[in-house]
Image: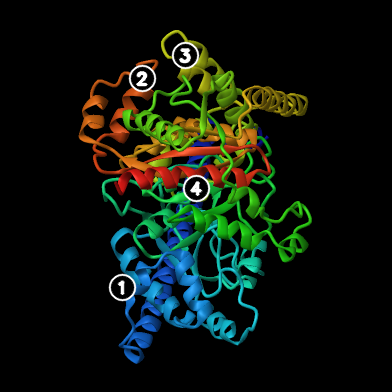
Amino acid sequence: MLLRLLTLLLPEFLVDLTFVLLLLGLVGFFLVVRWISEQSTKMKIEQAQTQRDCALQLMEKRTLRYKSRHEDVDSSRILSLQLMELVEQMKKGSLSPETVLHVYMDKALEVTKEINCVIDFLAECETQVQELKKQEDKGLLYGLPISLKDNIGYKGHNSNCGLVHFLGVVEAEDSALVQVLKKQGAIPFVKTNIPQSLINFDCSNSIYGQTLNPHNHKKTPGGSSGGDGALIAGGGALLAVGTDVLGSIRVPSSFCGICGLRPSGDRLSNLGVCNPVSGMKSARSMPGPMARDVDSLALFMKAVLCDDFFQLDITVPPIPFNDEIYNSKRRLTIGFYDTDGYFLPHPSMRRAVQETKTLLEEAGHKLVAFTPPRIEYALNELAIRGFFADGGKTLADEFAPDIVDPNLKQQLFLYKVPNIIKKIASFFMRPLFPRIASHVEAHSGCSSVNDLWKHYTSIQEYRNEYVKQWRTLGMDALLCPMLSPAFNIGHPGKLFAGFSFTMLFNVLNFAVGVLPVTTVTPEDEEELKHYKGYYNDPWDKEFIKGIEGGVGLPVAVQCVALQWQEEQCLRLMKEVETVTRGRDHK
């Protein structure tokens, strides 16, 4: 319409010139808008970094003030105590919660200066510890300093998921988990770093940068609960609250050599927990504990599964922790596998399962071989297609105003590609790289609401099939590989399929935990040089690059139980911990 009007009013050459100028003006306008948006993003990042620095400076100031007034505190002795011992001594009065808090504040500062894991100081902790001393009822976690993953809501503080447009949003109240943890005497004192958008098993974002693995600074601590894992492994905390949607508690626990539990959904509450993609039901995200030993995980579950918690969130079934199952000495029937046939594990991963199997058999348990049914179908058609049911659009949109972390650019590219292009690319890839082709095509998601309903039905049918096979073998629990050792920094974003070892149990919605059982040997590293994988495709080649150089790093296993059976899962974890540590002390 505008061009027709110009044609009537102006000579032809002026019309052409005017049109060119108009076009240049529009381009210029959009460039200016984009520049303003980029400057706004950079300003928000700088403000967040300044807030983080101020918070850590305040934390250091409070710590130095306390130390100057209490020079006789034996910090090394306090830091050497196991969680159960520490809580018991505070309950008895032989240690002050105030002293313990400031010792761990000091240690957390030392750790984060080295590996960049703490992003916020919860200064209210000092007020809380004073109030705690007045209380007659001493909860199960009395006086225990704990860390929180960034997305665990805490009143007066931000949960940004590593994304710029979530910055500046202050939580109006504590998450349900934080409320009940406080009632049980726990003292949240820091928040920790995560990967941008949480959907990655590295630990880096454009706001706070890269977190390093305390065992090896060339390695990632894992993600998305990587800051928690790194802080615990570095000695800056005994207990943390993470979240797990595809393996986000288990991967950092494995990479950092600690213990972690992903409860089955809805055993714990998600009220007040921030997620960049809400409403997705195919792979359930759940908060859960991370700690140095299994007893600490069990104490956490026992503490939070109480009447206060059940009142805060009516979707949580009122099922208290069952000590009888956790402490049982009954012989277990344990299924096991050392590979699922989809991604050939690192040599140390298979060795970890086989050695643990042998030790459990020597301890009197029955081990039976188990083969996960239709594993490629479950991972691609159920996990990936369901998680990205919208083709990845919702997640990609969260990055729109952001500066994309370099470690995620390859991963984000796939989310942004139109679904029709994903399908075409998959078709042409399939003859050469069938595994990758199926993975790419699954990212096109579900085409309609009807398709999504069929997808949910397929998940339930697969769960029934899996449980039937489980019941046929009379299994109490399952032992299987866990992605180990820690990846080299920057490689997780190039191999999202690394989640294949963990995401299956989110789709099944089972209780699952991890714990370290061995370390990578020179022999494992030498065997890795001959690794071809099952397909010898680009993923297998990237796997070698991502995981090489791991001698001496922790290697974990996964312990799995059916839905609502967290106690059984922890029971197997405790048995594994007992037999593997017993071997190491011989």
Of helix, strand and loop, which one carries label 4? helix
Is residue 448 rendered to the left or right of residue 392?
right
Q: Answer yes or no: do the residues labelled 4 and 3 have beta carbons within 8 Å?
A: no
Q: Answer above or below: position of 94 versus 42.
A: below
N-terminal-most mark, 2 or 3: 3
Label 1 environment density (alpha carbons within 10 Å; few <14, some 14–19, many ≥20): few
Marks 1 and 2, how far apart at CA? 45 Å
What is the three-letter code of the residue carrying label 3?
Pro
User: x and y percent of residue 524 in the render?
Assistant: 26, 30
Q: Which residue is mark 1?
A: 76
N-terminal-most mark, 1 or 4: 1
Residue 574: which numbered mark, if any?
A: 4
N-terminal-most mark, 4 or 3: 3
Marks 3 and 1, how far apart at CA? 54 Å
Res 112 quadrant in image = bottom left
Of helix, strand and loop, which one carries label 1? helix
N-terminal-most mark, 4 or 2: 2
What is the three-letter code of the residue carrying label 4?
Lys
Of helix, strand and loop, which one carries label 2? loop
Q: Which residue is mark 3?
A: 434
N-terminal-most mark, 1 or 2: 1
Quadrant the N terminus occupies: top right
Residue at the image position 69 percent from the left and 48 percent from the top: 266
